[in-house]
Amino acid sequence: MDGFFPMADDRHGEIFWHCPDPRAIFPLANLIPSRKERQSFRKYNFSFSIDTKFEEVIYHCAEREDTWINDEIINTYVELHYNGFAHSVETYSSGKLVGGLYGVSVNGAFFGESMFNTVPNASKSAFFYLAEHLRNRGFLLLDSQYINPFTRQLGAIEISKNMYMFLLRKALELDCKFI
């Protein structure tokens, strides 16, 4: 793996391969929800599942007005899911899907792709659930690709491409299983 990932310009756009420098990652050891976030999570009594509604999650992620997730991306990631590489975390409140995220897992690396929520903090809760899940399984790398205000708020940092490639190589040497 060389650190590239696919992204379309928009819902109907062509897909290009990206490898940003600097690269955004989440330091897994430091990803702990704040007290305020935990209170919000309790308010909605969130529960979670993994890989039970992958297609629903990716379709919800694509429902934004501005999105890089086009039909080709959806079809590719659904195929990756059926082949055991793409995974989803689903957030429920009162039995209803209210948030989630999806990404790709290879050995000790997880490449976060997108998230959605229909109630406040449902995607954040899925993210922190994912972080704990990855820590418990010995993962080294949680890749955010690009940084933005939301991912920075969650704890993303930027590192050089050289440092990213070093971490990626180390993560790929690990024998971690997402499920």
Image: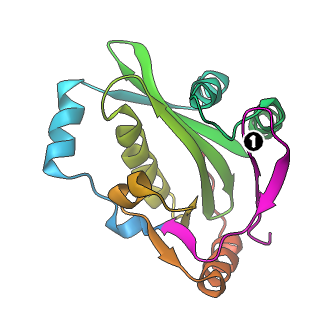
11 on left or right of 21: right
User: Where in the figure is residue 169, as x and y percent of width and height?
Assistant: 70, 78
User: Where in the figure is residue 80, as x and y percent of width and height?
Assistant: 79, 40
- Give the answer, above or below, for where 57 lies relative to 94: below
The part of the image, by quadrant, that contains residue 77 is top right
Query: Looking at this view, is 23 or 90 the one in front?
Result: 23
Position of the N terminus by quadrant = bottom right
User: Where in the figure is residue 16, as x and y percent of width and height?
Assistant: 82, 54
113 on left or right of 9: left
Report if residue 101 lies within the magenta region: no
The part of the image, by quadrant, that contains residue 4 is bottom right
Crowd band around label 1 with a 10 angstrom C-alpha radius: few (<14), some (14–19), many (20+): some
- Name the residue that disc number 1 marks: 84
Amino acid on which disc 1 is placed: Gly
Residue numbers of the magenta segment: 1-25
Q: Is residue 50 visible?
A: yes
